[in-house]
Image (cartoon, rainbow, N blue to C red):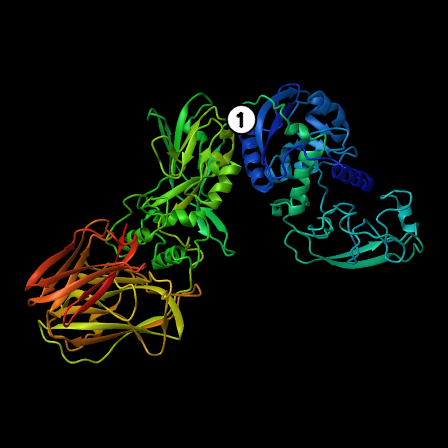
Amino acid sequence: MSDVSRQEVLAFLQQLEGLEPAAGLSQSYSLPVHLTIINDNNGQSPSPFVDIIPTMVDILNEMNGFFTNGMQFFLCGVSEVDNSAYYNMSLSNASTFTAQYNQPDVINLYLVRTLSVSTGGAILGAGSFPWSGWQGVIIHASGFEPRNVSHELGHYFGLLHTHQQHIQLLSNGSWNATVLPDQCLCCDCMDGDDFNDDCYDCGQMCDCNCTNSGDFFCDTPQDPSDQYCNCGTFPCVVNITLPNPSDPDNPIHFMETYYPDYSNLMSYYGGCRNKFSEEQLNRMKETLMEHPTRTHLIDEDMPSCDVFLANRGKVQIVQLGDNGGIELVPFRYNKVEIDEAGGAGFCEKTTGIDGFYNIQDCGLQVADADIEVSPQKDGTFPLELFSTYQVSTGDLVAIGQHILGIQSLPNSYAKIAADVNNSGSITTLDQIFIRRLILGIDNGFASVPSWRFVPDYALTFPSFHADFDDDPFSAEWIRADGSEYHYQEEQNYKSYLDLLDLNLLNPDITQEPTWSFRGVKMGNANLSSPDNPLLPGNHQIITDEHEAIQEGDEFTITVSAGGNNKEVVGYQFSLLFDPEVMEITGFEPGNLNSFTLDNFAVSEEAGAGILKTLWFSQLEEEFSFKLQEKPVVLFKIVARARVPITNLEPELELAEDAMAPEFYGAEGKLEDATLILDPVEIDPQKHRLLGVYPNPASGQLSFTIQSTEEEPIAITLFDQGGNDIVLEETTVEGVQTFQFQTLEGLQDGVVFYLIESEEALHSGYVIKY
């Protein structure tokens, strides 16, 4: 691109200030691009023709990731010109050339074999400024790639190079070109000439800053250009020798240190470039909406466009980023199905390690045909598809904090992950189903797959994106054809999740986001990631000395936890035991609230017994407990010896492979904890609670109790609003079930129970809905 004078830029900026926007500042715009391929007179294209159109589609799709200001580009049309005079293009012919091959109401992009400036030097591209005498973007075949095309479009929408007016030799805030500290600190000389050497003699002191010189942006650091700095060299130290007009025999030497932004697309740092600055993005949007040479792209006179199929789509996993926002990482080896509506055809493509899958190989044709696209939601390969992937008690804690109003889930993706019963809300029922999965009681969720997917296409609709960010459960996606999609599938609406239906005449099929998805792991409400795990705590298990336990004896093991005075809001761990040595027959509460038998699961795997347990509070006022030097009793295990046990220590150990031991600190860290096991022989209990079901319950609620004798008992149910109902019964020897016929009068949500007899007391909670 040729140099541009400061006066031209100032006039352009002044013109923008005096114009009214042609449309809303917050709107998004799809901008049509027409590609003109310049062949020689024999029809030889600048690069292999079979690759040009797919490459152009890919370039625009990748470019759209750079333009985060609501400006998106799509291929509207392609034409060919056989003209050897322009096959190897000189920029001096740009005005004649572009006037001859201009298409109205589009961004004209021309692909030529070579491109050079008037002096003969080769350049990779040239983009006209809004005020230029010619209009369009010309690309050298060797520069037909996203960064270079984005760079030239930056010029097209009014951006200068970050190194504009060459090197800035001073660190005093001056943004002018070549200046001498003892002679000229001007942005330009009095005669308005920025480039001639007479600037050395102007003797004019003037105030140069980031708003009136250089590239005219304050968020782009000083850039000496690639003539002096190399991508990755940080900082960049520049040594320069300049002629001294007043003393030619004594040249002037400079050494300055710079910190250029090598990633800026308006720089010359090649493959390091990947973004525009915020001010640059705003300037381009303003130019589009206000400048008379650009507003035709967004007026009502839209061109008639052809439809070009995108080459690929992408499947990504939503994770919680370091700053609390979302982070998208590739979903590798996910099988994406593309079906013709009605099942007439089928294509399955697997994503690569970058998350992309190929569309072109499916043989789709632009025609009036309906298809359905859906990523893989369940399975055993890859590892990410497992139902338990990244699901832990930490998610139960996060959901509990959300329900109780302590801390909301961070975003809409986390809320979707928490809604494992697909109710369109987040309740304790979701915690129950996640708990059953963690404990191994269930192999998956009954109402939702292991993964759900939000189409990127839906998020390209600004009104839906805003509603989705506010509340995914009430967001409505209304597409251009009037079809409406809700969170849940209903009689008149489809769900916007998991499956995307498209018509192959839809012009949006040229856009990569139309074929792309964001995956949400159900149950992973804290959006945890194996790439950014919590540092594991240190755990040990200590068994207190005890009297010998005889075969057939019933005994309790008090399980306590101690630590370094840290608040804990939840825990999970598992214990390995030998089922031939002892039988676990039940559990009793310790000193923590929210005890329930549903927090435990006992199973046998390959001859080994495994006890899995977890805890999280249902009470806002008692949401945590403290790991102190004096251990707190978590719960008690009731067991029966199958052989004589003189030392229980080798019979119980942490089963880290079954479920990682984790104590969740109130500050979001995993805390250290010491587990203490204290076995004590006990007399047989008069009453033992064997089960409470169903949980959750809506109507009847049953309690199964084992008793050794006849005795009156009272079972009280009460909610957090102070309502209660009581069932008074008499036990007999053996196992029996007592039933509440109705839960009417109790609030939905957590319902606590209390079982009282002369010598026994049991408590816990269930969920009413």
* Residue marked by disc 1: 50
Asked if 302 appears above or below 495 in the picture, the reply is: above
Whether residue 588 sits left or right of residue 177 in the image: it is left
**Quarter of the figure that contains the N terminus:** top right
Give the number of callouts: 1
**Image quadrant of residue 16?**
top right
Kind of element beneath mark 1: helix
| Relative image position of residue 233 (x, y in whole percent) | 66, 56
| Residue type at the position of mark 1 | Val
Asked if 129 appears above or below 634 in the picture, the reply is: above
- Residue 131 visible somewhere in the drawing: yes
Q: Nearer the viewer, residue 431 or 180?
A: 431
| Relative image position of residue 106 (x, y in whole percent) | 64, 26
Asked if 621 appears above or below 495 in the picture, the reply is: below
| Relative image position of residue 241 (x, y in whole percent) | 82, 55
Whether residue 194 sits left or right of residue 343 in the image: it is right
Residue at (24, 62) in percent of width and height: 764
Q: Nearer the viewer, residue 767 or 542?
A: 767
Residue at (41, 29) in percent of width and height: 362
**Image quadrant of residue 397?**
bottom left
Whether residue 422 sits left or right of residue 585 in the image: it is right
- Residue 108 visible somewhere in the drawing: no
How dense is the environment of label 1, judged by Cα within 10 Å: few (below 14), some, or many (20 and up)?
A: few
Q: Nearer the viewer, residue 313 or 433?
A: 433
| Relative image position of residue 208 (x, y in whole percent) | 81, 51
Whether residue 569 sits left or right of residue 613 in the image: it is right
